[in-house]
Amino acid sequence: MSASGLESGLGQLGLWLHLRGRGAGGSGLPPVPPGAGPAIVVHVAPEADHAERQVLRRMVTLRPDLRIIRLPAPAAGLADPGDDPALMRQLLDTARPQALLLLGAGLPVALIAAAAERQIPVILAEARLDPQRSASGWNLRQALRRQMLRGMAHVLVTDPASEAAALRIGVARERLDMTGPVTDIREPLHCSEAEREALADLMDGRHAWFAAGLPPSEEQAVLAAHEAVLHHSHRALLILAPGDPGRAPALAERAEAMGMVVAQRALDEEPEPEIQVLLTEGMTEMGLWYRLAPVSYMGGTLSGDLAATRHPFEAAALGSAVVHGPRIDQHPTEWQQLDRAGAARAVSGAEGLAQAMVDLTSAELAATLAHNAWSVSTGGADVAIRIADRLFEALSQESPTP
């Protein structure tokens, strides 16, 4: 038997073993919306929850008559209904969908198998494929996964590593797209344009970086990083927004003790040419500082003191390159999206922060990072459109025979 034939046989055996003994233990069929428009079944893996709203909104906007049948998420401790063979066969025979849309790489085996039996096209999107799980080998589970992925009408992955994994699995190049991730579109923070122009003129092209939402536990690390930046670029300016505005006087004293010249926004002091640290009035005017600073460090991500940690897309959407520490407990999906796209600089500690800030005094490097971050933070709508386009291609095909 050839390698491909053996893998196919293993895949069929794996499917049988996976489905064996799984009865119709689900919580019932999801409702089928009335109407004459095309029906699609949508399955959303937990890691793709963030993408569902944008993708479905885009599809309904383009096709108002679309009837969406959303499989319910499994209750805690219960199996995914997409793995219930009897329920999935009943669902497809009742709803007679023209396509399946799977968001995320959690593959509902029974649903995919039932669709294959009925020649219903399956589109997998927002897929992050683990290269380790996708590696070659004769493990039954791996063979089953490869067989399912190769049978998809189209696979849309979020990053280059997933694209490479899909190609290794054997997904045909013409059925594979690397779209990037679907991201939440956040309304950019506002600022006074007159104030921005005045401060930009005052700063006169100086390199600036912004420490946003800084907790006390990271004050020394940020000031030490700026000390390193000043050795490299003596006109550099640190704009510092403490998570607790009451820390500004103590921060000013600490920076001055290190030999830095400090201005405090609360005292109506401006970043004159000799000023090396500008202390803001806490977490106000954030949109102003992100616009003025080409680089932003998101406070709390070094120490894990996350009380004042900001959403990373705030900075990214306003053209500021983003630096973060290892503690990304808040907004982990967004941080992973930025890191995978080469759109953020991750550091492990105070020394790494200092080195990153010195490196990012390079305008070209900071601009590249900022452009990548902007693309991730604002690209969700484009990715949702591409997913919808692939689904509508499947809908334009001849409807499956009931």
Image: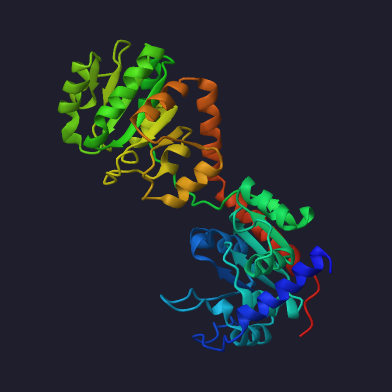
Q: Residue at coordinates 81% horizontally, 69% vertically from top-left? A: 5
**Quadrant housing residue 76:** bottom left
Relative depth, front residue between 242 and 33: 242
Q: Is residue 171 left or right of residue 27?
A: right
- Can residue 233 be seen by looking at this rendering? no
Taking 241 as reference, is 226 above or below it?
above
Q: Quadrant of the N terminus?
A: bottom right
Relative depth, front residue between 187 and 18: 18
**Residue 353 image point, x, y percent:** 38, 29
Relative depth, front residue between 199 and 276: 276
Q: Is residue 401 left or right of residue 328?
A: right
**Residue 93 image point, x, y percent:** 68, 86
The way the protein has been coloured in the rendering is rainbow
**Residue 68 image point, x, y percent:** 60, 73
**Residue 71 image point, x, y percent:** 55, 76
Relative depth, front residue between 194 and 213: 213
Taking 203 as reference, is 95 above or below it?
below
